[in-house]
Image (spheres, rainbow, N blue to C red):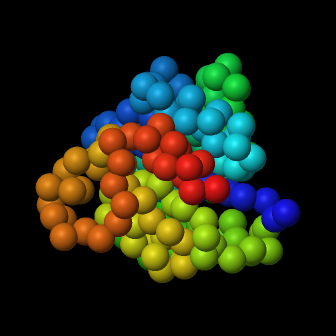
Amino acid sequence: MTQAYVLLDRDGVINHDSDDYIKSPEEWHPIAGSLEAIALLNKHDYKVIVITNQSGISRGYYDEAVLEKIHQKMHQLTAEKGGIIDAIFYCPHGPNDHCDCRKPKPGLLNTFAEQNNLSLTNIYFIGDKVGDAQAAIAAGAKPMLVKTGKGQNTLNNNPDINTPIFEDLYAAAKFIISEK
């Protein structure tokens, strides 16, 4: 059997987002049920991969060492709930840097696929913004949106969006495992 994966955006999907950016481990707080959702996916043999834009680095709000500490907290709290995040792919660039990795471009998803020698055709990518859905579609993955984070605003501003929508990551995870 081939390995199954679920790809997740970070801010607004796993943890509470902030218009002022998550700049320290102390500012990183999980959304209720999100860490349990990761554990649920793991329990059903899905590996969880995080795909995240982190332009706060290029903006000078924090550096990669602080980002690593934020991710250490995320790993630790996820493990406490019985879950594992297998890898994190992040873009440190700003919106004007013209990189290929910043969502809505598919670079991070494509890098993950290349490193694991797989097609994204049957892999869900769960986000809370239109750019997440656009990146998923551009990479050939299956987009999903959650209403947490910027999700409700995304839906209000894009009423015709044609993507499965869930209240939160736990609801999306329950749907994914029900399809297996």
Q: Is residue 39 left or right of residue 16?
A: right
Quarter assignment of residue 16: top left
Quarter assignment of residue 83: top right
Q: Is residue 65 something that shows in the picture? A: no
- The quadrant in which the N terminus is found is bottom right
Q: Nearer the viewer, residue 160 or 78?
A: 160
Q: How many marks?
A: 0
- Please name the residue shown 42% across and 59% down the image: 144
Q: Position of residue 170 (x, y in %)?
A: 47, 37
Q: Position of residue 41 (x, y in %)?
A: 64, 42
Q: Nearer the viewer, residue 165 or 127?
A: 165
Q: Is residue 25 left or right of residue 78?
A: left
- Please name the residue shown 45% across and 65% down the image: 143
- Please name the residue shown 46% across and 71% down the image: 135
Q: Is residue 159 something that shows in the picture? A: yes
User: Does residue 144 lie above or below 54 as drawn?
Assistant: below
- Please name the residue shown 57% across and 56% down the image: 179
User: Does residue 102 lie above or below 26 as drawn?
Assistant: below
Q: Nearer the viewer, residue 29 or 142?
A: 142
Q: Position of residue 63 (x, y in %)?
A: 56, 42
Q: Position of residue 158 (x, y in %)?
A: 18, 65
Q: Is residue 62 left or right of residue 47?
A: left
- The quadrant in which the C terminus is found is bottom right
Q: Residue furthest right?
A: 1
